[in-house]
Structure formats: C-alpha cells, structure tokens
Amino acid sequence: MLVTMSVVVIALRALPFLVFRGGQRKLPPILGYLGQVLTAAAIAMLCVYSLASLCDFSQPQYSRLLYALPATLATIVLQASLRNPMLSICGGTACYMLLLHYL
C-alpha cells in the first residue's frame, strides 16, 4: 500500500514537469492564474477553519478564540516585519500559549 501511494504521489508531482518540460509547451493562462491564487486561498481556508474550531458557543466566556485572535494578529505582524515563517509561527504560538495559560 505504501509503495502504491508513493508511486502515485511521485507520478502526480512529476507530471507537470514532464508535460511542460523545457518550455516546449506554453503554460495555459488558467494554470498560471491558479498557481498564483491557490496557495493564498488554501492558507486562508485553513486559518478560517482553525479559528472557527476554537469557538465554544455553548460557553462563550471560555472560547479559546479570544486568545487565538491576538496570537493570529501577532503572527501576521511578525511575518510582515521579519519575513521569516519559522519566527512568525513560533512567535504566534508562544503568544497563544502565554495568553491561554496566564489570562
């Protein structure tokens, strides 16, 4: 099963390079557009899903969303200023954990 999954993943990853190798075939405009917007769209979807899962509507005073929003803002500010994903993620996580445990 692992061998089959590995072969399929490698084949799917290699397929675009085989089809559009060496600039022989021009990339269709729709694929160029999707290459530009899908990464940001996927990240935005993950953020919304993650933040929505923190809401506890049965007991709003215990909602972890109140801690996650400032931590998310801290992550955005760190990424915008430092341009280092590892520092941004670690800083946002530290901010969330400090807020969660000390407030």
Image (cartoon, rainbow, N blue to C red):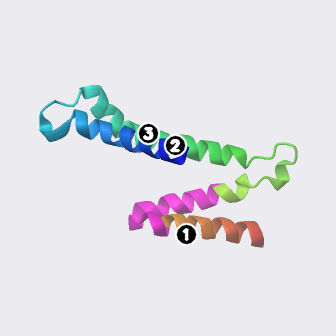
Q: What's the magenta region?
A: 69-87
Is residue 86 or residue 77 the one in the foreground?
86
Say what secondary structure mark 2 lies in: helix
What's the distance in space between the residues labelled 1 and 3, CA to CA? 37 Å
Q: Is residue 83 magenta?
A: yes
Q: Which mark is residue 44?
A: 2
Structural crowding at the residue carrying mark 2, measured as other residues with C-alpha within 10 Å and reported as few (<14), some (14–19) or many (≥20)? few
Answer with the quarter of the image where residue 45 lies.
Answer: top right
Secondary structure mainly formed by the magenta segment: helix
Q: Residue at x 69, y 71 (%)?
A: 98
Left of 63 or right of it: where is 89?
Answer: left
Of labels 1 and 3, earlier in sequence is 3
At label 1, which amino acid type do we have? Gly
Is residue 37 or residue 67 the one in the foreground?
37
Structural crowding at the residue carrying mark 3, measured as other residues with C-alpha within 10 Å and reported as few (<14), some (14–19) or many (≥20)? few
Q: Which mark is residue 99?
A: none
Left of 79 or right of it: where is 59?
Answer: right
Say what secondary structure mark 1 lies in: helix
What's the distance in space between the residues labelled 2 and 1, CA to CA? 19 Å
Q: Which residue is mark 3?
A: 8
Say what secondary structure mark 3 lies in: helix
Q: Could you say where residue 11 lies in the image, as x and y percent from the top left?
A: 37, 40
Q: Is residue 33 magenta?
A: no
Q: Quadrant of the N terminus?
A: top right
Q: Which residue is mark 1?
A: 91
Q: Residue at x 62, y 70 (%)?
A: 94
Q: Quadrant of the C terminus?
A: bottom right
Residue 63, placed above or below residue 40: below
Left of 34 or right of it: where is 17?
Answer: left
At label 3, which amino acid type do we have? Val
